[in-house]
Amino acid sequence: EAVPECHYCKLAPEQIHNATLLAEGEGKLTQDFVGDKKSPRDWALWKKTKDSEKNTSWDSPWGPGRPGWHIECSVMASDVFERLNDGDPRMDIHSGGVDLKFPHHDNEMAQAEAHSGCTQWVNYFVHAGHLEIKGFKMSKSLKNFITIEQALEAHTARQVRLCFLLHKYNASMDYGDNTMSHALVYEKMFVEFFHNVKAFLRDQDVLGSSQKWNDATQKLTIALTKTQNSVDAALRDDFDTPAAMTALVDLLKTTNPYLEERSVVALAIRRVALYLTHMFRVFGLIQSGGQEIGFPVNSSGSGDSEEQILTPVLNALLEFRSKVRDCARQKDVGGVLSECDAFRDDALPELGIRLEDKSSGSVWKLASPEELLRERE
């Protein structure tokens, strides 16, 4: 019966007469009893046991059976919250797939509110969009699904997480090469940015260097503050991670030209890098702890000793030294330069070291050997 204080179909009021969704919510078991309903929108609180369901059957005043789909959720949730909250069954956040809005979540609320007498059982619903493969909802029945293990065979966990961050959680996302390529572009931008920042700071006395601001430094500091406010506003606006990521990229694009300025305040650069690293820890792209700035080069946690880590590097240096000495004895200047190039292009990438020659000198950057070898190819 209708209760004036309670309202049905709050989440998707436009679907209240959708017979197809109502039938899907009830399942095949209740289709034979449609004529027994007072209203076509009524749903089963208790379902009669079939012969094949003897192991999931309980006695009740209506005969042996089991809870209906909607009632089992609202009863379990209400029971837990009543125990934790002095008899109050209400909750702040309830989540699920977007396809559960109606009738499942609407029916859950109707049951819980009718039973408890409250008019708002849930304060906030968080509905996730569908993950699609080639335009269709990922589903075992359609045989168009991919497991997490399979996804991680093609891409790193960081790349997959970055892909999700670039899409709104409550919108559908088509998973595939095109989607991942967008994430790979973003990753490369930030990886290169952190490499450049660490190479710059490596030769700087951050606190002892000049702190004199010019117009470019002031512009960068204003951009950092603006980005912090934009990211905060985006995440408060229903976890809008795509907008947050766009703001972070804009900050990166503002910082890159500043790194090329003649007068650069190291502390200003460091503040930007620390903020980006902090946000990536919040997003799960960088694990807590570890290095202060940027992505970890090797997060395997192998626990190798210093000797084990340095051995391949020292072996490469010994081989390089031997070849250079041979060229020097023969007064072969061209040979020395060729060995230097080979050391940079062949030996160091296999050790996870990128050596870049610039007009102001050479800088080294650390990356995974696999990444550097792919670049060489």
Image (tube, rainbow, N blue to C red):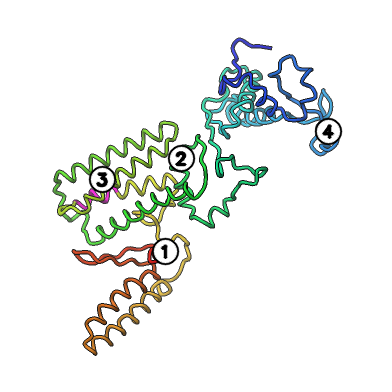
Residue at 32%, 58% (x, y): give it. Answer: 195
**Residue stretch in magenta:** 265-272
Amino acid marked by disc 1? Arg
Specify whether 126 is left or right of 143.
left
Q: Quadrant of the N terminus?
A: top right
Q: Secondary structure at mark 4?
A: loop
Amino acid marked by disc 2? His
Main SS, magenta region, reads helix
| Mark 3–mark 1 distance (CA, rounded to whole Å) | 28 Å
Query: Tag on residue 126?
Result: none
Label 1 environment density (alpha carbons within 10 Å; few <14, some 14–19, many ≥20): few
Closest to the camera, between mark 1 and mark 4, is 1
Q: Is residue 320 above or below residue 231?
A: below
| Mark 1–mark 2 distance (CA, rounded to whole Å) | 27 Å
Sequence-first disc among 4 and 3: 4
Report if residue 323 lies within the magenta region.
no
Q: Nearer the viewer, residue 15 or 118?
A: 15
Amino acid marked by disc 4? Lys
